[in-house]
Amino acid sequence: MAPEYTLYCFAQSGNAYKAALMLAVTGTNWTPRFVDYFNGETRTPAYRAINVMGEVPVLEHGSRRLAQSGVMLDYLAEKTGKFGASDGDERREILGWLLYDNHKLTSYTATYRFLRTFVTDPNATLLEEFRKRAEVAWRVLNAQLEGRAFVVANRPTIADLSLCGYLFFDDEIGVDWNDYPHVRDWLARIRALPGWAHPYDLMPGHPLPAAKR
Amino acid sequence: MAPEYTLYCFAQSGNAYKAALMLAVTGTNWTPRFVDYFNGETRTPAYRAINVMGEVPVLEHGSRRLAQSGVMLDYLAEKTGKFGASDGDERREILGWLLYDNHKLTSYTATYRFLRTFVTDPNATLLEEFRKRAEVAWRVLNAQLEGRAFVVANRPTIADLSLCGYLFFDDEIGVDWNDYPHVRDWLARIRALPGWAHPYDLMPGHPLPAAKR
């Protein structure tokens, strides 16, 4: 059967991973479409025709093309009936954590990990600043998870799938989740979901060619 | 009549302004509750009892307390029936722009303006980095607004009220919106909404005491 969904993605993108993981753990029929980000594909006119801002990921479903991982998660929760909210209060709590993730947790973590792992000779001031900001967000998440199995409910929701997007790259971030034990235990619970796979196993493009490492 | 909503806010917070502006342009009965951020109120145990992360704004409605400006906008659109989505596709577009605003536009603009305006002797590398990132976001917004009256629809939605949160502080940011003409014209359309007021007129705490300037 032809895949129902196509995800424009590459293995190193934690934002793409959020959607890929949702597709995987919901047992959805999907296929990845590799985007050669590190060789500049997102700056080509052909890719700009797919997404005007040159963003990854893009999720294709029939004639519909969605940008923004949070929108994809919301859409897939609606379509699959899984990992969504059970009522209005929960829906708002999920939205709040999607926003927090985009504003702070993923934003600072992804920028820091990019500088640390993919930039040659990164600026020390920027490294320090983004690390500091990421650590604050990890502490907030750790505090939220104290005494909770998942971020919003006793079951996983799209809030969890968003927040964990970059956190399985712990070696590239240079973090030991034992220092954030509630995050560590929560990541183990996510890892135990049927269908879970590491971003480098779920999406194409890993490892990078030697010249890019 | 007692105000229906209480918004914990202070004049310099563009994130609080997003909710305050929504309350104002929907003609909702609300009252501001001043938070003395610049004298450390958000770090006090009393404030942490209101919001565990010490965030501003907080919106109080009956026994409900909401955090995150995007959640408040979504909630107020539902309660007032104004500035919300007309269908599922529009809802997803609005969500996408709320996420973009939190991830990039407000995030970088607010950090840059804070460093530039409220920090004594800010680090030049950080100033330059956040300015550069903010400018990319302003260009994205300017491109989106070319040929459009508002960001998502032909009428204003909560996406507009979110994205404009920090943009009326143009002197403190050090930007001339004539350099981003579609943003300039869109800000004029927002300014023309009945009930519109500048953040410094809508919320308490301006000007700062001299020692804080």
Image (tube, coloured by chain):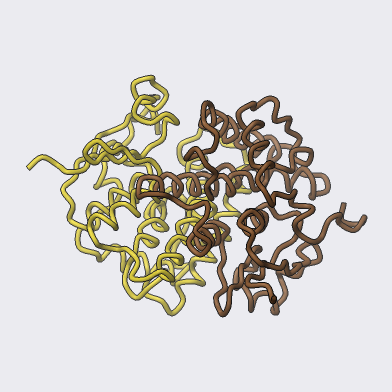
Chain colours: A brown, B yellow
User: x and y percent of residue B3 in the render?
Assistant: 14, 42
Could you tell me which quadrant the N terminus of chain A lies in?
bottom right
Query: In the image shown, does A140 or A21 lie closer to the viewer?
Result: A21
Whether residue A5 is situated above or below residue A160 in the rendered picture: below
Q: Is residue B93 left or right of residue B186?
A: right
User: x and y percent of residue A174 in the render?
Assistant: 76, 35
Q: Residue B1 lies in what quarter of the image?
A: top left
Q: Is residue B151 left or right of residue B84?
A: right
User: x and y percent of residue B94 in the render?
Assistant: 42, 63
Q: Residue A188 lies in what quarter of the image?
A: top right
User: x and y percent of residue A140 in the render?
Assistant: 53, 32
Q: Residue at x 75, y 54 (%)?
A: A12
Q: Residue at x 72, y 75 (%)?
A: A44
Query: In the image shown, does B179 or A170 lie closer to the viewer?
Result: A170
Total marks in image: 0
Whether residue B74 is situated above or below residue A181 in the rendered picture: below
Q: Is residue B148 left or right of residue A20?
A: left
**Name of the residue lying farthest toward the left:** B1
Q: Residue at x 50, y 34 (%)?
A: B119
Q: Is residue B73 left or right of residue A179?
A: left
Whether residue B145 is situated above or below residue B97 in the rendered picture: below
**Name of the residue lying farthest toward the top:** B45
Query: In the image shown, does B72 or A82 lie closer to the viewer?
Result: A82
Q: Residue at x 39, y 29 (%)?
A: B38
